[in-house]
Image: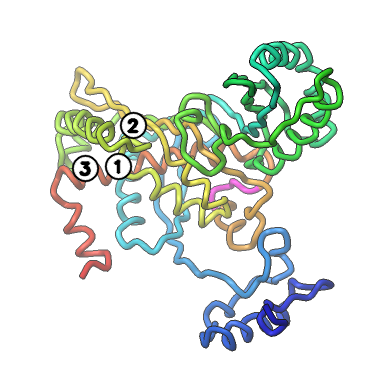
Amino acid sequence: MTKSDRIPRDKENDYSREMASQRAAFVKAMAGTKLDTVSSYTIDPAVTRGNIENFIGTAQVPIGIAGPLTIVGEHAKGDFYIPMATTEGTLVASYSRGMRVISECGGVRTTVVKTSMQRAPVFLFDNALEVREFGKWLNEHIDAIRGVVKTSSRTAELTEIEQYIVANMLYSRFCYTTGDAAGQNMTGKATLIACEWIRANHPLKPRYVLSGNTDTDKKHSMMNMIQTRGRRVIAEFVLKRDVAKELLRVDTEWLYRFRQIAYVGTMQAGAAYAGAHSANGIAAMFIATGQDAANVSESHAGMNYGELLDNGDFYWAVTLPALICATYGGGTGLPTQRECLEMMDCYGTGKAHKLAEIIAAVVLAGDVSLSSAILAHEWVSSHEKMGRNR
């Protein structure tokens, strides 16, 4: 690599319009591509420090609003208008339809039932007996380890250390609550400090690897479907039979049967979500509100459950066991993303549970609309009318 091949940087002040312009000129020289639109941004490049390197501009993804969505939750209460960033035509309209149906039925109940973020170190020994005894030692010293964690963070709190012994290794999962932050970096730092303390204080001074991959960071896993990663949140409502016929043009009996059909298909395919399309709503909200988009891989997994009630109404619930979202830190403070969070009164501390409830409610609204469109033979025609099908 020659000096002329290197991306321009300024060690003293790399987050400036001047440096962004230099890099845009570099791209034009190296690739022959002008970045007129990418370089047309309104934010101050200085605010992106800590969020990106080699800043050249912004990706202007269209944002639409869906709603209103009536939520009767523990933390989210009232009617909400939802910002959704997407390039998929029909998506915002479909979610709005699902939200109208839910609101006409009295709203969606939402509940966060568990919070847990993990880092998963592996401790290495000579034999399985040493591993078993080390596991006992960890349990006996859990309070001391919690104290060490507190020195690394004002927010992270160690709740438990899961243990899984394989051969001469102990795979562990250090589980934390992380306040209103997503917490991956926070728990990484806390666990590193805890592991160093363990190594210094255990008689065998065990070697360790900070992550043995059972935290499955940014990867879907059945481990997190069972144990929870981020927030485990449930959204539920009762779809009234007459509302289903009027607004969705389907019978609740047919919706109930479709749940069974879809579950068999999900099982055959080995899919991570048994509903219609959880990733659509989650990704659109993540991009709009400054979440780490890679966390969609974990967050979209879940269960879609239904019961046909005696009066013909249909109980419908979505459970998301690994929803990773934040209202503080990361990309949430960037100007566009902050505005979208403020639209739902979800910016800052004390709001993460509220945002999680809203996201789960949005996922349910999307499933209501798309499932019904499939059954009413309106799925393709809607995309032909509103999307960019050719």
Q: Residues within 10 Å of mark 1 (few under 14, many from 20)?
A: many
**In contact (CB < 8 Å): disc 2 and disc 1:** yes
Residue 331's image quarter?
bottom right
Location of residue 71 in the rendering, given as x and y in whole percent from the top left corner: 44, 37
Left or right of 13, for residue 40: left
Left or right of 220, for residue 240: left
**Which circle's residue, 2 or 1, is located before the other in the chain?**
1
The residue under label 1 is 276
Mark 3 to mark 1: distance in Å? 10 Å
Residue flagged by tag 2: what amino acid is it?
Asn
Residue located 30% across and 52% down the image: 94
Left or right of 258, for residue 291: right
Mark 2 to mark 1: distance in Å? 9 Å
Residue 110 visible in the snapshot: no
Q: Which element carries disc 1, helix, strand or loop?
A: loop
Between 42 and 304, the one nearer to me in the picture: 304
Between 327 and 172, the one nearer to me in the picture: 172
Q: Which residues are magenta?
A: 343-347
Residue located 57% across and 36% down the image: 213
Residue flagged by tag 1: what amino acid is it?
Ala
